[in-house]
Image: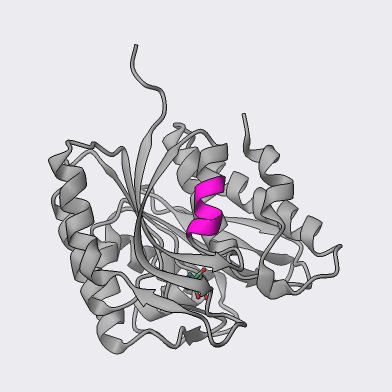
Amino acid sequence: MKNPVLKIAAVHDLSGFGRCSFSVILPTLSAMGHQVCPLPTASLSTHTGGYTGFVFRDLTPDMEGWWRHWQKEGVEFDAFYSGFLGNAEQIDITLDMIDSLPRDTLIFVDPVMGDDGVLYSTYTEEMREGMKRLVRCADVITPNITEAAFLLDKKPKSSYTEDELYEIARSLTELCSGDVVITGVESPDGVGAVWMGKDKKLCRYIHEKHEKSYPGTGDIFASVLLGKLLKGDSLDTSVKCACDFIYSVVGYSKQFDYPTREGVLLEARLSELID
Ligand code: PXL
């Protein structure tokens, strides 16, 4: 009988504390029944949002050898998932990995670059150009609204008309030729995601806005979306499930008094993701 557990090659950083990147990607996708195979780009004692003085090790020199070893061992992946990348060389290495994969591998790119209208401090112009090349290879991309603007060389704004959102999503489907899911889109009724698939129809799913925001929710959103798509769910169902989960876990976490920089209380809500 065929092994039912799908394998995902995941290229992200490891932040030891603060619930970002692998700290949330691994439990989320495992709860959904998938195997995450981590290829770490860097190790940090914490994420970079809200902490200073963190211990940081750049793992760029190990990335190609790590990938070659998997290839030599004949490991076959059902999906490839990239996120926060530390420098322009890591983007080129990630592109080479994607190039070496069979055509039917699902390429899922979360083009992590910034939030709230600004690029993360580690992001350079060269990396932004590299990220545009990376999204071109993707079957699914999940920029937040700030990253969507940066990918299209536009200045981020705090609100967008329906026509502007349509144009952003359509331009991104041309850039990546896959499905585009844009998160953190504000509207008078709340906040949520808009998405556009092959039919070029703009869809939207909104929840009322929680007054607190936490780091790492973009990583959890992308992981739930990927997990659902790999189970064979439609793009619409998968996006709605990811939005519902984020709404639920933020709503749960905000009742408790602890520093938001520690991220959402994922461990307490993971069971919602188990079939
Ligand atoms: O969740 C995005 C992310 C990933 N990795 C690191 C980060 C951040 C956001 O701040 O600092 C190290």
Residue 24 painted magenta: yes
Return the x and y of residue 106 as percentages of the image width and height. Answer: 31, 44
- 72 lies above or below 13: above
Quadrant in the picture for residue 83: bottom left
Q: Is residue 203 visible?
A: no
Q: Relative to 15, is 97 on the left or the right?
A: left
Looking at this view, is 167 or 129 the one in front? 129
Please tell me which residue is depicted at 57% across the width and 87% down the height of the picture. 52
Quadrant in the picture for residue 76: top left
Looking at this view, is 111 or 33 the one in front? 33
Looking at this view, is 26 or 198 the one in front? 26
Colouring chosen for the image of the structure: one colour
Residue at the top extreme? 1
Please tell me which residue is depicted at 26% across the width and 70% down the height of the picture. 60
Residue 72 painted magenta: no
Per the picture, the main secondary structure of the magenta-coloured stretch is helix
Quadrant in the picture for residue 220: bottom right
Looking at this view, is 157 or 82 the one in front? 82
Q: Relative to 169, is 107 on the left or the right?
A: left
The quadrant in which the C terminus is found is: top right
Return the x and y of residue 251 as percentages of the image width and height. Answer: 79, 58
Q: Which residues are magenta?
A: 22-27
Please tell me which residue is depicted at 48% across the width and 74% down the height of the picture. 164
Total number of numbered labels? 0
Return the x and y of residue 160 as percentages of the image width and height. Answer: 56, 77
